[in-house]
Image (spheres, helix red, strand yellow):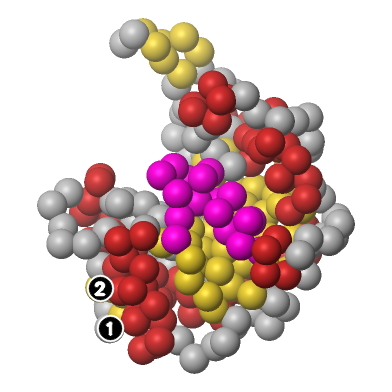
Amino acid sequence: MIYAQILAGGKGTRMGNTAMPKQFLPLGSKPILIQTIEKFVLEKRFNAIIVVCPSDWLTHTKDLISKFIKDSRVVVITGGSERNDTLMNGITYIEKTFGLHDDDVVVTHDAVRPFITQRIIDDNINAVMTHTAVDTVVPAIDTIVRGENEQVNEIPIREYMYQGQTPQCFNIKKLKKAFNQLTTEQKEILSDSCKICLLAGEEVHIVRGEVSNIKITTPYDLKIARAIVEKRVVI
């Protein structure tokens, strides 16, 4: 079974003073979340498309999907307090609803990356069928500087550096096993889902993303996204 999980559990604090979390803000004629879900509905290999949202916005999310999306594969559940709690809530739903099988995989994606292409989705599905974990990346353009206490500690070789995007994809049983092996301290500082598998000693395969696959996090990002939709700029 192949599942998609749209991570829409964030509160959007970096977006500033908005009336709602960023995934619900308008982008063109539809909310950002809907623009993202529509890309996944086009992929017929998904057995279910699970949208994980804040508990306070559950009814709102269901109403939006009922209005814009006509696909019975799309379901809405509540997320957790942190990103990886939200991810695991989706895994728990899959296990309780469909059961878990050795070859089951999940394609997870940020709700606020609405410009994902079908090529990226297709490449991720193909890769996760033969790899435990898959990360979508683009080569770093700027030099990456590692620093601490306002001092530069390291400047890594740029050709080995990438910027992480989503989707991130996993064999579900192996992801669940890896997550359960983490200590409480590791879970508290975990900022990336693929690191769950890295800490368990699993290899993470790379799929190339696109510069256009931007994450709408700040007011500036939203301006760029709206300009793209209005065809004023091309990334």
Residue drawn 45% across and 55% down? 79
Most foreground residue, 50 or 162? 50
Q: Residues within 10 Å of mark 1 (few under 14, many from 20)?
A: few
In contact (CB < 8 Å): disc 2 and disc 1: yes
- The stretch in magenta equals 78-94
> Quarter-wise, where is residue 30 in the image?
bottom left
Residue drawn 64% across and 75% down? 48
Q: Position of residue 29 (x, y in %)?
A: 27, 83
- The amino acid type of the residue labelled 1 equals Ser
- The amino acid type of the residue labelled 2 equals Pro
Q: Is residue 116 visible?
A: no
- Residue labelled with disc 2: 26
Most foreground residue, 92 or 116? 92
Q: SS for tag 2?
A: strand
> Quarter-wise, where is residue 22 in the image?
bottom left
Instruction: Give me the C-alpha separation between circle 2 and circle 1.
Output: 7 Å
- Residue labelled with disc 1: 29
Quadrant for the C terminus in the image? bottom left
Q: Residues within 10 Å of mark 2 (few under 14, many from 20)?
A: some
> Quarter-wise, where is residue 26 in the image?
bottom left
In the image, farthest residue toward the front: 96
Magenta region, mostly helix, strand or loop? helix
Task: Name above or below for residue 173 compared with residue 235.
Answer: above
Quadrant for the N terminus in the image? bottom right
Q: SS for tag 1?
A: loop
Task: Name above or below for residue 160 compared with residue 225.
Answer: above
